[in-house]
Image (cartoon, rainbow, N blue to C red):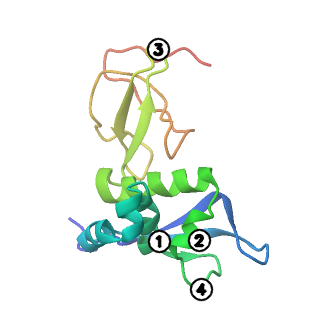
Amino acid sequence: MSGVLQTEFEFTLPQGYADDDGELHRDGVMRLATAADEIKPATDPRVESNPSYMTVIILSRVVTELGTVDDVTPRVIENLFVSDLAYLQDLYERVNERGLDAVDAVCPECGESFTVEVSGDSTPGGGEGNGHASGATGASPEMEVEPPEGASPPEDR
């Protein structure tokens, strides 16, 4: 059992945030969320009038660095490209809810989605076993997930 909890996670946005001077910021850091990060925004008037705004406020609290941007505010998050917002939402979910050792996968034969746990050496660690043989489609698209014993692997694509 390791005694160190990882609380900060580096990331690179797919597109990047363009500031008012046109400078592009792609590299950043997200910290683990606290209970306050999810509770306090609920009383924000912007969330009360538009519940979808909760995501913007939460991400502005947990993204601690973004390139050379001095302060990651809700305005910064609002001005991200949709693909970058989706990327940060997925990262938030992975580090706070599912754990970084889980990736989403889709069975190439039946199309069923499921979660696969992976270890740092890109070998499967169990997952929510459903007997599917598939390639992961989440954070590591090039990683192949081994089929369960006795199952035949999918045809080469």
Mark 4 vs mark 2: in front: 2
Tell me the CA gap for discs 2 and 3. Answer: 41 Å
Instruction: Classify mark 1: helix, strand or loop.
Output: helix
Q: Are marks 2 and 1 in contact (CB under 8 Å)?
A: yes
- Mark 3–mark 1 Cα distance, whole angstroms, equals 39 Å
Q: Earlier in the sequence, mark 2 or mark 1?
A: 1
State the image coordinates of residue 148 (x, y, percent, origin top left).
32, 23
Quadrant including the C terminus: top right
Q: Residues within 10 Å of mark 1 (few under 14, many from 20)?
A: many
Q: In the image, is 93 to the left or to the right of 85?
A: left
The answer to which of marks 3 and 4 sits earlier in the sequence is 4
Q: Name the residue tied to disc 2.
A: 76
Instruction: Please provide percent x and percent y for residue 10.
Output: 51, 68
Q: Which residue is mark 1?
A: 60
Element under disc 2: helix
Tell me which amino acid carries mark 3: Glu
- Of mark 4 and mark 2, the one earlier in the sequence is 4
**Above or below — where is 121 with respect to 34?**
above
In the rendered structure, which amino acid carries the disc numbered 2? Val
**Mark linked to residue 109:** 3
Q: Nearer the viewer, mark 3 or mark 4?
A: 4
At mark 3, the secondary structure is loop
Residue type beneath disc 4: Asp
Please give the residue where the numbered disc 4 appears in the rendered image. 70
